[in-house]
Image (cartoon, rainbow, N blue to C red):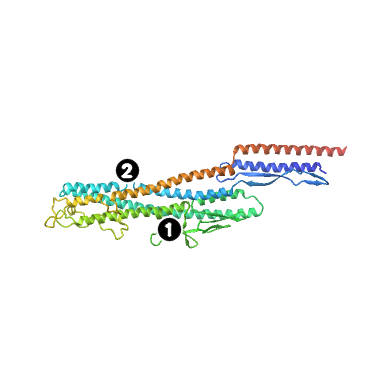
Amino acid sequence: MSSLSSSLGIAVRALLAEQGAIETTSNNIANVNTPGYARQRPDLVESPPAVYGNMVLGTGVQLDQVTSLRDSILELRLHQETQQQGKLDAFLGSAQQIQTLFNDAAGSGLQGPLTAFFNSLLQLSTSPSDINLRQGVLTAAGNLANAFNSTAANAITLQHNVDRSVTQSVNEINDLTGKISAINGQVSTMQSAGQNPGALVDQRDQLIRQLAGLVDLSVIDAGHGSLTLTTSGGSALVVGNQNFQLTTQADTVTGLQHVFSLGKDLTSSINGGALAGQLQTRDQEIPSVLSSLDMLAASLANSFNAQHQAGFDLNGAAGGNFFVPPLAGGVGAAASLKVAITDPSKIAASGPGSSGSGSAGDNANANALHALQGQAIVNGQSPLDFYSGMVFRLGNDLAAAQSQQQTQTLVLQQLGNMRGAVSGVSLDEEAANLMRFQRAFEAAARVATVVDTLTLTAINLGQD
């Protein structure tokens, strides 16, 4: 039959169970502001009953386990959306720097120098023999060439800066995978031993979230609490307690860093995280801008040289190259654009006369050179129209990315709210739980006191 000692056992088990529940609640309150923390729930269960003949008597309560409340599917969604957010953030951060190279309103860009150059030719056409106007054309041409050179050089510098960011991101990825693999092993060991690895799982999830912000991830449940992490292309990053580091190697042609995993080049297959955004800017956006600049510079130089050669200079000699001819194909034309003449009298402003030579006062070729401003000499467009289209495409890419970023931010906020509903700590709820467990603890302590008093009374009765 039940005895005072069994009643005392019930009280002691209740004290221990409620004490564990209070500790769990206190831990929740302490971590209310901890990023990635998942609220813990003390699971109280009835102790196995005692059987006395045909009677079954309860033996109290015990703390079965402490469960971390998390939705694994929701965590995976957060990892996936974080990859896209990281990509957009990195792309916009560097692409916006490209846009500053073409801020014509702030004095950068090519629209001003292009317009000034063609305006100088218009002024020259009013007085072709004026040496000052001729010098003005050379000055405007030099300014235009410098603008091309500076814009191309700045774009190349930005490309190399982004390339350094790629190396930095790879180092951060390796650091995170090292930490994740270490925690992965600890989680597996604790779970196999029947212990609660909730705190370590929280840390691991937070590190995985950071990793997802850097590179595209696939998260695979390997069992026993262990996770396997790979890139979306299948290259291993973390397997059990082992991590596989990424490496970088400079391309022999461009000098830019490529990303490798176990000897395999992953550069073109990375499609998520900040690394993908950096690679998109470095390998697509900036080369596209440089290609357009080269096309504009080469077409302008070649067309202008051809028209200049059709005229005659102030001394009646046939015109030569006005700009240094770009290389075949126009590669690097913007960075190397340069005026070929320094003597203003060498500008071929006049057209051929009846004798085949030019007249000093003739402005026929100056007008023809100025007319190139409105002619379709650059990929079927005028120079300014081509330039405007290039700037528009860049702005459109940025606007589209900004719109996607705003949408992605809202998605992440919604997922974060959903996670908070499952795993977040509510101080009001925890305060209510704390009071409830406290009262239960006090009641169990009171039972223990009563049993202790009854035991002493029983002992004293036996001595009478």
Circle on res. 420: none
x and y, in percent, of residue 357 in the image: 13, 56
For residue 105, the mark is: 2
Q: Contact, CB < 8 Å: mark 1 with mark 2?
A: no
Pick the residue in front: 187 or 128: 128
Up-down relation of residue 318 to residue 7 (above or below)? below
* Image position of 335 (left or right of 90): left
Q: Quadrant of the N terminus?
A: top right
Q: Amino acid at mark 1?
A: Gln
Residue marked by disc 1: 257
Q: Which of the two discs, 1 and 2, sits closer to the camera? A: 2
Q: CA distance from mark 1 to mark 2?
A: 35 Å
Identified by mark 2, the residue type is: Ala
In the rendered image of this protein, does residue 367 appear above or below residue 429? below
Q: Is residue 121 visible?
A: yes
Query: Looking at the image, which is closer to me, 150 or 349?
Result: 349
Q: Earlier in the sequence, mark 1 or mark 2?
A: 2
- Are there few (<14), some (14-19), or many (20+) residues within 10 Å of tag 1? some
Locate residue 444, reporting x and y percent: 73, 39
Residue at 48 percent of width and 46 percent of height: 408
The spot of residue 232 in percent (x, y) is 51, 56
How many C-alpha atoms fall within 10 Å of the one at disc 2: few (<14), some, or many (≥20)? few
Assign a secondary structure to mark 2.
helix
**Element on which disc 1 rests:** strand
Residue lying at 75% horizontally and 38% vertically, measured from the top left: 447
